[in-house]
Amino acid sequence: MNDKTLRILEFEKIIDMLKSKASSSIGKVTCESLMPSFKLYDVKERLEETREALDIVLQWGSLPFDGVRNIESSVKRAKLGFVLTPSELLDIAGLLRCTKSLKTFFEDGSKNESYPITFEMVDTLVYIKNLREKIEEIVIGTDEVSDRASDLLFSLRRSIRDKNSRIKEKLQGMISSHGKYLQDPIITIRGDRYVIPVKAECKGNVPGLVHDQSSSGSTLFIEPMAIVEMNNQIKELSLKEKAEVERILNQLSRIVEENADHLLHNNTNIGYLDFIISKGKLALDMGATIPMVNDKGIIDIKEGRHPLIDRDKVVASDIRLGKEFNCLVITGPNTGGKTVTLKTTGLLTLMAMSGLAVPANDGSTLSIFNKVFADIGDEQSIEQSLSTFSSHMVNIVDIINNVDSSSLVLVDELGAGTDPTEGATLAMAIMQNLYEKGAKIIATTHYSEIKVFAMERAGFENASVEFNIETLRPTYRLLIGIPGKSNAFNISKRLGLSENIIEEAKSMISKDEANFEDVIQSLQDKTIQAQKQLSEAEGLREEVNRLKKELAMKQEKIDEKRDKILEKSKKEAQDILRNAKEEADRILRELNEIRSNAKSASMKDAERARRELGSKLDEASKNKIGTSTLKVGMQAVKSVMLGDEVYVSTVGQKGIVMSLPDSKGMIQVQVGVMKMTVAVKNLAVDTAPKKQTKKTGVANMVKTKANKTNSSIDLRGYMVDEAIYEIDKYLDDAFLAGYDAVQIIHGKGTGALRKGVQEHLKRHHYVKSMRIGGFDEGGAGVTVVEIKK
């Protein structure tokens, strides 16, 4: 990639924004090395990483990278045989802690499926438990090793502490007895040896070794002879302590050396994971989306925004190139937004090629280019004595010499800085040359001749930046399809220029040119209106497509549910017939036994068995409606009334009639929280005689519960503890009301309430079984509970 292009388009500022999102130093290094790729498959992989990262950031905020530092240089030093410092070892332990945290984060299997790229990288990390534990046990500070690192170290440090205490006691006694010779009654240290401050004139009264003197020379710091040997002993112990610490650190360093390859692998992968998550954080901050990419030179940016302009101030633009036309010529007033359009196109292209999300709406498309050229701004060289025109022309010559069919060329004010007539013709010739070489071009200009040129040439298209005459301010909106209109007369008039002067100026313009400007204004007005209507139509079309897709998915799920119900009904029917056959065989065996006894009294038993057999067979054949079976004591309905309780054979549950049959024999039934339309022939009523009991207080209570208790309870919005309390009360009522099954509505949400409810139901004494609701029952937001009898 051309370094000059990267500089002109300010790509390094995007890298700085990305780098600021990284949590670790190794992640920041990876961000700094990011460059656009020219390979389509590579760009798609990078964008998929960003898509995953954005999902993780939205769902979890980030990954656990706390305390991670770049350990590459430390590990390489260990491989060369060097002894690592406590600080370096702590950094290695920090990386291993991060490794463990990442692996723990992905222990949830659902995350593995949701974030396959990230999980694959985490899965390759190697957690070296013993190394981390040894470091954390031995190293307790950036420059401190624990006393318990070894028995010898503990013994040496205890001896040093004892010696220090004895020296201080000795010196304290000397201070008391020689106080008049001392400058101050204190104990101090010079060169790792204990000394006392003695007045210079009293030097002879305190025999010992002089280690230092004050700046004024009035105080000498003397090590009394009485403690010289004790100081020597402390020095020897300190040297032994230092050697033992060195031995311990060397031992740890050798373990690091043994695991160097794993540690370097972890370091690189964690740095790259941090880089990936940084891309997701940047996308979230920018309000960016993942674009579609191609290598055909097609650009279709929807509501694209320049990422370096404040989101509250930037004006979004639709930018197209490479499909209907390969060269876009933008005209309009200065400070109208032409240059921003060029930079937005170029910078969003570089971001997409780097695998970054772009600040544009969903559905935006960007292309991969082998070369991106930009000649934007005035870069004249004073040292080379080049004018603005010459400076730009040097850049244009370089572009023409290197451009090919896979190039994007962005040129600002093409042909400016010289005679208008020559500049315009030169600009047209340059654009034609670039077009013939197959490049994709966006150029800005002030020359009206180029507007006509772009209108007449196939593959060229005009565009303009909108200007509000009323406010004398640009709106910065890009209008593709119409050239920009010169607003000099209108602007001058609103600023107070004399009407006579304006009319005189207009008279000097040819009639054809004036008519051309009027046509441009008319085109601009009509295009703005058409774009508004098109935008509304596009929104409606997308809404219709979304609804069609949702309906198709719902229909597919309904069909799948219906097939499952039919299959289940067939199986139940087969089970009933099989059970009836087994019962019949049992009765026949009894008949044979009776016949073998051949007793007159047994004929009654035979007749009883025969009647029982007939009854069983009749029941097996009658208890079927369509492909479904009925419960004992139920029969098909002949007519229904609003509010009747019926048994819906297709779903095996009771419901309430909500409407009368239509012309096709279909009625609406409320089953739990679900309303469904079923055929009358698939309904049944319970004809089993009700057990008559004396109406007692308990019976009245049961009747009351049956009337007041619904077949479902809604717990959405409850805390788990509150929900469990409500479930216990509800299941008591549902049991008394005689429900076979009820529905617990907990919603989907984060899943915490559903998990808590289901854990409680597993242990509840009224619960026979439970399952997640079907598609027509509320899906994962409902748990269906079968109640024990």
Image (cartoon, rainbow, N blue to C red):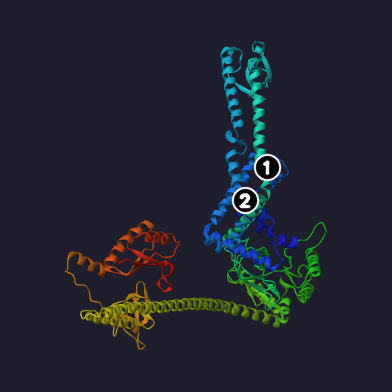
Q: Residue lying farthest top?
A: 205
Q: Residue at x 77, y 70 (%)?
A: 415
712 relative to 15 in the view: left or right: left
Q: How many marks?
A: 2
Residue 331 numbered mark, or none:
none
Say which residue label 1 marks: 254
What x and y, as percent, mark residue 401? 81, 69
Secondary element at tag 2: loop
Q: Amino acid at mark 2?
A: Ser
Q: Which residue is mark 2?
A: 24
Residue furthest toward the right? 384
Callout 1 secondary element: helix
Give the Cα separation between the discs numbered 2 and 1.
26 Å
* Relative height, residue 330 to residue 144 (above, below): below
Estimate how packed mark 2 is, as few (under 14), some (14 to 19) or many (20 or more) residues with alpha carbons within 10 Å: many
Looking at the image, which residue is at 58% across and 15% down?
A: 175
